[in-house]
Amino acid sequence: MKAQIIEKNGKPEYAVIPYEDYLRMLAHMEDKVDAQGVAEFHENYVAGREQLVPAEILRRELEGESPIKLWRENRGLTQQELADRVGISKPYLSQIESGKRQGTIETLSAIARALDVSLELLTD
């Protein structure tokens, strides 16, 4: 890379570089930022602070399905099995999954623990 240095009062003020060099430099900086983001995610994932969401769950949730239902199915649990683990009735869980009831923060937290996912993955 060859740069033209423009001085002001005898001190370097600007560096002018060819446009292609500028574009390569931008791409390199973006790659570095992307790599840093991936490394941070990986560190958080290994430490248990991040979770991966299967594409099928994401797709179905975007279509309006209950994230609790989707994660329950992903874990291979029936409504009765999850309700038993959480200590609530199956009809109450069904109402939460269908959106007829919201569920208390305590109940939603217990559901998240039973499904081994973060509460944020189950709530808006």
Image: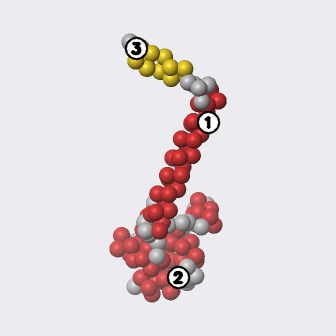
Within-10-Å neighbours for mark 2: few <14, some 14–19, many 20+: some
Quadrant of the image occupied by residue 29: top right
Which amino acid, by three-letter code, is at mark 2?
Gln
Distance (Cα) linking label 3 and label 2: 76 Å
Q: CA distance from mark 2 to mark 1?
A: 54 Å
For residue 48, say whether it is visible. Answer: yes
In this view, the residue in front, 102 or 24, is 24
From the viewer's perspective, is residue 111 above or below residue 33? Answer: below
For the residues bearing labels 1 and 3, Cβ distance under 8 angstroms: no
Q: Is residue 113 above or below residue 2?
A: below
The numbered disc on residue 10 is: 3
Q: Position of residue 107 (x, y in %)?
A: 38, 75
Mark 3: amino acid: Gly
What residue did someone put label 1 on?
Answer: 24
Among numbered discs 2 and 1, the one appearing first in the sequence: 1
Q: Locate the N terminus and report the quarter of the image it occupies.
A: top right
Q: Is residue 90 above or below residue 35?
A: below
Crowding around mark 3 (Cα neighbors within 10 Å: few <14, some 14 to 19, many 20+) is few
Q: Looking at the image, which residue is at 57% across and 36% down?
A: 25
**Mark 1 packing: few (<14 Cα in 10 Å), some, or many (20+)?**
few
Q: Earlier in the sequence, mark 3 or mark 2?
A: 3
Q: Could you say whether the residue bearing mark 2 is in a helix, strand or loop? A: helix
Q: For the point 42% across and 82% down, which residue is it? A: 86
Residue appearing at x 48%, y 83% in the figure: 82
Residue at (51% x, 47% y) in the render: 33
Vertical arrangement, residue 37 with respect to residue 79, above or below: above
Cα distance in 3D space between marks 1 and 3: 29 Å
Of circles 2 and 1, the one toward us is 1
Q: Which mark is residue 79?
A: 2
